Amino acid sequence: MAIISTWSYGLAGILAALLALYLASGWRAGGRSRAMFLAVSLCALWGLLGMTFAITGQAIFFAGGLLADALRFGGWYLFLLVLMKPEAPEGQRSPGRCGWLGAVAVLLFVVGFGSQLLVVSGIDLVIAYMVLPSQRVALFASLAMSVFGLVLIEQLFRKVSPDFRWSIKPLCLGLGGTFLFDLYLYSDALLFNRVDVDAFSIRGFAHAVGLPLVALSAIRSHDWKRRLVMSQRAALQSATLVIVGIYLLFMASAGYYVRLFGGEWGRALQLALLFAAMLVLVALTFSGSMRARLRVQVGKHFFSYRYDYREEWLRFTQTLSSQDGFSGMGRHAVRGLADMVESPGGALWLKDPSGRFFAQAACWNMPVSVATEDHGSALCKFLVDSGWVINLEEYRSLPRRYDGLTLPSWLVEVPNAWLVVPLTTGNELIAFVVLATARARIDVNWEVNDLLKTAGRQAGAFLGQMQGSEALLEVRKFDSFNRMSAFVVHDLKNIVAQLSLMLKNAERHRDNPEFQKDMLMTVENSVERMRQLMLQLREGATPLDGPRGIDLTDAARRIQTAKSGQGRDVELTIEERLVARGHEDRIERVIGHLVQNALEATEEGGRVWLRIARQGTNALVEVGDTGHGMSPEFVRERLFKPFQTTKPTGMGIGAYESFQYVNELGGTLSVDSAVDAGTQVKLLLPLFDAGSGIDAADAPKEPE
């Protein structure tokens, strides 16, 4: 065992000495390098004394090692405190305050070093006629020093800025590992009232393993420029950790003496006390009031400002962003404002869409209210004109501060009403929030008022944006409905034109049986088309049935027959009988629209033609004329846009609807036109395989 101790402590001492020599080169770099040099030098002294004792067995080296151990703790405390101390501006002296951490560090060092002196001197401690063995006191002190070392490392790592964690992380790992090993060693010794010889002999190895990590941090940060941000969260967590540690040590000590002096009931009383202590600790941990009081005390006594504005703003923004609809948005806004002042609940009064009054739109841990507030009331005018946060407690005691403000009766009756926070967007009051009395006593000073007013503006902007988004969505729905209605009106116009032509011809041919038969067929077809339009208007723009095979030859002939009644002939050329994919009524409507446009653009003596042919895996429908034509600019910029037309009575819907439908089918529509030279429209539609019911373009090809 002596050989293991020799190598263990010798390795720790030599590595620490080498690191001290490296740090000696940066002695002039600043106080941080000097503090680290001191701590590492004390580690080297402790390791070398432990190695010497293992070799010689002389008690004087053992005593020196105990004292050097306490000094080593003090050296690391000093380095960590210096590393956490705020840096002074350029040309000024660094502030010397270490706060409560420095006071606790000095106290623990004095107690630890003093207890080691008692062990070396062989003197037991006597308190109130009770003898405490010096060895046990030293173990308690060493355990407390190990725990406090972990507290310092935890606070350093939490306070450090993210860009500096890369440099500080090896130091925290190395020192944290050594403190954890000491924590295990001294806890085991106190529990079993003996020191684990094996663990004590390899203690040097444990410290030697951590030294390279400390050296790595020293290399990464030559001057140990501290880039720490003072975080209230870190201070709160550290304070909570210290309070819990003190509480557990006190209850453990109480349990120890209850068992010692309790006789045969000692063990039972000890277990009962420890169980009650843990139950009380859990209850206090989950108590919102206790957390609120602790947060208020930490902000009041450790910081110049009560709030960590970065943390508050990130939390508030995250709360507002976690929305689930407009009602959820209002509830999140209330909760975000309430969390800033430790309020357990609140409610939101939002302006009605009519703008005439405010009504409760969301509540969080507060009763639902049906009360409304007129937008021109004294309360609303005061909130708009002043922008103040109304403190109802202050209003009750000093109403003259609020310039004759009269509160509505419903607000006076709200239980535990405390603050009224205006939510504005621009110069408009969009809502206000009523918060319940805080869990802990909070002084609503200028800082709290400014934070709530600024947060209220942000929440008002969020609510205004949400209202604007909902209004835009509603407008888009109406726009979609109006666009679909325009399509329907366009189709109805064509039906009306067809029926008007039929009535005009009826005056001359009403006694003709063939005309009567054709008239009945036309009326029946018009009724069916209007029924389809009504279904489309009710169900949406998408056809109810899916695409199927459409015989383009039959459709082309029906269009030729229908247009022949207008006194113009349409030249029809069918090179191959083809079946395309689509909806029969819509395909016929698209081709009919193109033919009708060609007829209207062509004067007497001009040509209008319709050609059906195959082009690859698509069906080509070509509609051409020798009419007026269109300019390239009109074709490129206006033809396929809604409500753009060159016809005095046109609506500008047909070309847009045709273009959209052909694209939905996977086809293309191209136009070649020139002014006074005519127009040629080529429509490519996917072919339909009538045998298998699939598109010809998607059908498997035969191997060549």
Image (cartoon, helix red, strand yellow):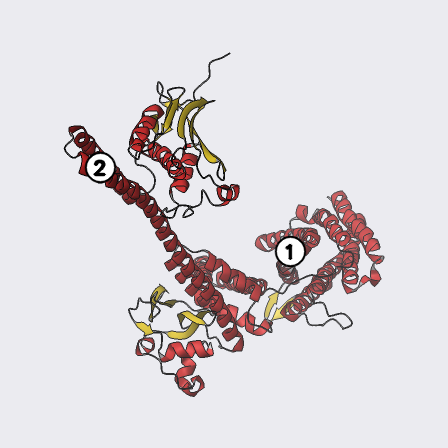
Secondary-structure class at tag 1: helix
Task: Kindly identify the amino acid type of the residue bearing the numbered disc 2.
Answer: Asn
Say above or below: 673 vs 157.
above
Which residue is pictured at 37% across the width and 74% down the height?
417
Please provide percent x and percent y for residue 625: 43, 33
Residue 369, disc: none
Left or right? Give the position of 172 relative to 377: right
Image location (x, y in percent) of residue 470: 39, 57
Secondary element at tag 2: helix
Q: Mark 1 sits on what residue? A: 162
Amino acid at dot 1 = Pro
Residue 170 vertical position relative to residue 245 in the rendered view, above or below: above
Q: Quadrant of the N terminus?
A: top right
Q: In which quarter of the image is residue 122?
A: bottom right
Q: Position of residue 207 (x, y in %)?
A: 72, 50
Answer whether residue 697 is visible to the viewer in this image: no
Task: Determine the residue located farthest toward the front in the rendered image.
Answer: 605
Left or right of 79 on screen, residue 684: left
Marks 2/1 in contact by CB < 8 Å: the verdict is no
- At 14% from the left edge and 33% from the top edge, which residue is drawn? 511
The outermost residue toward the bottom is 400
Of 501 and 81, the residue lying toward us: 501
Q: In which quarter of the image is residue 591?
A: top left
Name the residue nearer the viewer: 604 or 689: 604
**Mark 2 or 1, which is nearer the eye?**
2
Q: How many marks can you see?
A: 2
Which is more toward the observer, 13 or 634?
634
Give the numbered dot on residue 505: 2
